[in-house]
Amino acid sequence: MSHAPLNVLFLCTHNSARSILSEAVLNHLSQRQASGRFKAYSAGSSPRENQQPNPLAIEALNAAGIETNYLTSKSWDAFAGENAPHMDLIITVCDNAANEVCPVWPGHPATAHWGYADPSLVQGSHEQRLDAFRKTLQMIGQRLELLVQLPEHALEAEALAQSARELAGKG
């Protein structure tokens, strides 16, 4: 790859499930299918004190063969400072974060909203709850597969927001 990867930040409320799944899947796909064209991050608008990735999210990712050791829950404030990596695309993955006021991001990155139901709200046995995470992981994976397959021109700054928004209806 001749240029820096596109930095993508996935936002959700607590940064424990959907945004964590999205970060892990995009980094996995980028390394395996997209020659490192993407670098994914995740954060939450209001993570709880001592928030950690949901153990069921980690279990679902591990079962899918996706690396999880680097994943941590963090506030979106970590990406708003001057020393934070420049974001090219910010995608909200839950309805709560889509309706909240986002901080001003340096460089005014492209934005999109890809809503997913919160698998951590599913009640039942361990297997039923894990199945909700697997289904969410599958839906996220389908949409991210489409993202990494986009041609270069669809990932240029002028087209990136439109490309990401169009993918909201797919996958």
Image (cartoon, rainbow, N blue to C red):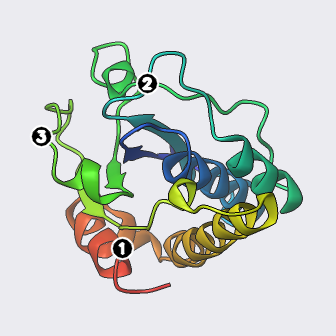
Q: Describe residue 47's horizontal placement relative to residue 72 as left or right.
A: left
Residue 48 badge: 2
Looking at the rendered structure, the secondary structure element under dot 1 is: helix
Q: Which residue occupies 33% across, 54% down?
A: 92
Q: Residue 37: in sight, yes or no?
A: no
Do the residues under discs 3 and 2 have CB atoms within 8 angstroms?
Answer: no
Q: CA distance from mark 2 to mark 1?
A: 36 Å
- Provide residue 61's location: percent of width, then percent of height: 77, 54
Residue at the spot x=28%, y=14% of the render?
82
Chain-order first, disc 3 or disc 1:
3
Relative to 140, is 109 on the left or the right?
left
- Amino acid type for the residue under numbered disc 3: Val
The residue at 47%/60% (across/down) is: 118
Hey, which quadrant is residue 45 in on the image?
top left
Viewer-nearest residue: 160 or 130: 130
Q: Earlier in the sequence, mark 2 or mark 1?
A: 2
Using a 10 Å C-alpha cutoff, classify the residue at mark 1 as few (fewer than 14 neighbours), some (14 to 19) or many (20 or more).
some
> Please, what secondary structure does the residue beneath circle 2 have?
loop
Q: Position of residue 29 (x, y in %)?
A: 69, 62
Residue with the mark numbered 3: 101
Amino acid type, residue under disc 2 in the picture? Arg
User: Rounded to the nearest whole Å, what is the CA distance between mark 3 and mark 1?
Assistant: 27 Å
Q: Is residue 25 above or below residue 141?
A: above
User: Disc 1 marks which residue?
Assistant: 154
Residue drawn at point x = 20 percent, y = 33 percent: 105
- Tag 3 secondary structure: loop
**What distance separates the C-alpha of mark 3 from that of mark 2?**
18 Å
Tags 3 and 1 touching, CB below 8 Å = no
Say if 49 sits above or below 66 in the image: above
Crowding near the residue tagged with mark 2, few <14, some 14–19, many ≥20 C-alpha atoms within 10 Å: some
